[in-house]
Image (spheres, grey):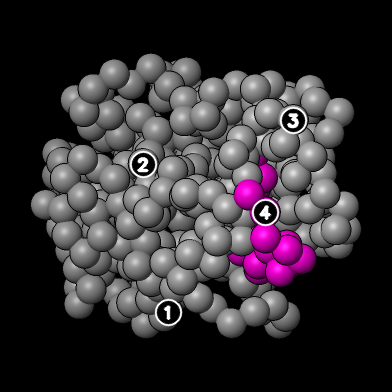
Amino acid sequence: MINSQDIFNIGSEADFKSLALEVFRLQFEANPVYRSFCDLLYKHPSEVKELHQIPFLPIGFFKSHKVVSQNKSPEKIFTSSGTTGLATSKHYVTDLNLYENSFMRCFSGFYGHPKEYVILALLPSYLERDGSSLIYMANRLIKDSGHPDSGFYLDNLSDLNGKIAQLDQNGQKVLLIGVSFALLDLVELGTLRLKNTIIMETGGMKGRRKELVRDELHDILKQGFGVDSIHSEYGMTELLSQAYSKGNGIFECPAWMQVLSRDTEDPLHIHTAPKTGGLNVIDLANINSCAFIATQDLVKVYENGRFEVIGRFDNSDIRGCNLMVL
């Protein structure tokens, strides 16, 4: 049995590969949905020696199946936002401490301890529903910051605008985490000139605004907030880990998470060299669900393991293997 703490003690590529293959063997045996998927692909652990040989479960399975590798009752069920009438993803989390350990270690590795910041969360579309893993994470970061000015904002944008300007002028380090459309709403109240504030967008217009390409969005936000770069967080309901970008949309993973790209014409073929394709994620924090996920994002992977999200597929790519009927 794998000790979950082993996930956070990875010190080399060899460590990651060894543990990922061990997690694959575990989930092949313990996860009925994933086992069925592997069986239909005629993939058995005895044949899998490299990361690119591991089957990646299409992310849509989290909408149609209960993807779990333990029989334990879930401590929390995270759900995705979804268009009315469409199914939403459900991630059955049997160990919230593992999730908290993952996102706290990841955040601290990239940004330092939350207590160094006033953390402001502008996440209206997430606050307005239950089951958001992003809200859970932001709430913990706000709590750990320990600052009386840290907190969530919903519609009181003018209050938030004044708060940021005052804190920044006083030399206080600030981290503003916001969904894209809300950050655009905020900068329309007036241009700021921030020197001590990090602006981090979590993506998504959620139907509130016209979709913008990343460069266009970041240019508007940089001008509106008066900052040199816009940071980004890459996460999703189906993952317990996040990747972060400190500018230019280039994301970096924590040591227990890696990305690969798959062929755009053959979703079962994984590229063995950095290349543009469909984004496949190995998230070893997902030890109790499925650690190997084929997402609907189109990605460019770089030599150093960093990646850039350049768009999204429609469902035809994920469904191309005709295995969604499991």
For discs 4 and 2, the disc positioned in front in the rendered view: 4
| N-terminal label among 2 and 1 | 2
C-alpha separation, residue under disc 2 versus residue under disc 1: 26 Å
- Counting from the top left corner in percent of width and height, residue 168 is at 70, 37
For discs 3 and 2, the disc positioned in front in the rendered view: 3
132 to the left or right of 65 = right
58 to the left or right of 193 = left
| N-terminal label among 4 and 2 | 4
The type of residue carrying mark 3 is Asn
Which residue matches tag 4?
192
C-alpha separation, residue under disc 4 versus residue under disc 2: 28 Å
Please tell me whether mark 3 sits on a helix, a strand or a loop. loop
The type of residue carrying mark 1 is Asn
Which residue matches tag 3?
170
- Counting from the top left corner in percent of width and height, residue 157 is at 82, 59
| N-terminal label among 4 and 1 | 4
- As drawn, the label of residue 315 is 1
146 to the left or right of 175 = right
Q: Nearer the viewer, residue 312 or 281?
A: 312
Residue at 83% from the left image edge and 34% from the top image edge: 149
What's drawn in magenta, residue-wise? Answer: 175-193
- Image: 90 above or below 16: below
Please tell me whether mark 4 sits on a helix, a strand or a loop. loop
Residue at 77% from the left image edge and 60% from the top image edge: 124
The type of residue carrying mark 4 is Leu
Location of the C terminus (image quadrant): bottom left
The type of residue carrying mark 2 is Glu
Which residue matches tag 2?
252
